[in-house]
Amino acid sequence: MTDQATVSLLRWLRRQLRQPTPIREHLEAAVANDDPAEARRLLDQLEFTDAQRRHVEGLLDRWEESRGRGR
């Protein structure tokens, strides 16, 4: 995952999940371990507005695309 994409996703997650919770910690670990599938699985457990869901899914899509280019 590119540094810019990582920073964007982590900032977004921290804004949405203001309190440090187990799921937030697991999401941050998924980002740190370059695991978009785990991040998607965790995010599916959370409630978002339609706009929020589109935004985070777009970030995850870009993450997955960047992984494909790096291989």
Image (cartoon, grey):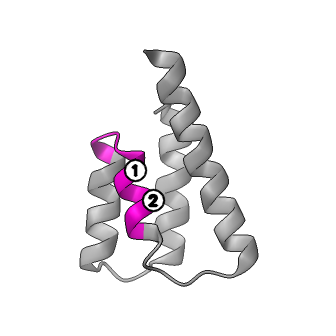
In the foreground, 17 or 55: 55
Q: Residues within 10 Å of mark 2 (few under 14, many from 20)?
A: some
Q: Do the residues labelled 2 and 1 touch (CB within 8 Å)?
A: yes
Quarter of the view holding residue 41: bottom left
Residue 32 x/y as whole percent: 30, 45
Which residue is depicted at the point 44% across and 80% down? Answer: 18
Which residue is depicted at the point 34% across and 71% down? Answer: 24
Instruction: Indicate left or right for 3 with 59 as reference.
Output: left
Residue 37's mark? Answer: 1
In the foreground, 66 or 8: 66
Q: Does the magenta stretch include residue 34?
A: yes
In the foreground, 61 or 1: 61
Which residue is depicted at the point 65% across and 70% down? Answer: 53
Q: In the rendered structure, which segment of residues is drawn in magenta?
A: 32-42
Q: Which amino acid does label 2 sit on?
A: Arg
Residue 40's mark? Answer: 2
Which residue is depicted at the point 47% across and 80% down? Answer: 46
Residue 27 x/y as whole percent: 34, 62
Q: How crowded is mark 1: few (under 14 residues within 10 Å), some or many (20 or more)?
A: few
Q: Identify the element where label 1 is drawn.
A: helix
Mark 2 → mark 1, Cα distance in angstroms: 5 Å
Q: Identify the element where label 2 is drawn.
A: helix
Identify the residue at the far top of this view.
Answer: 71
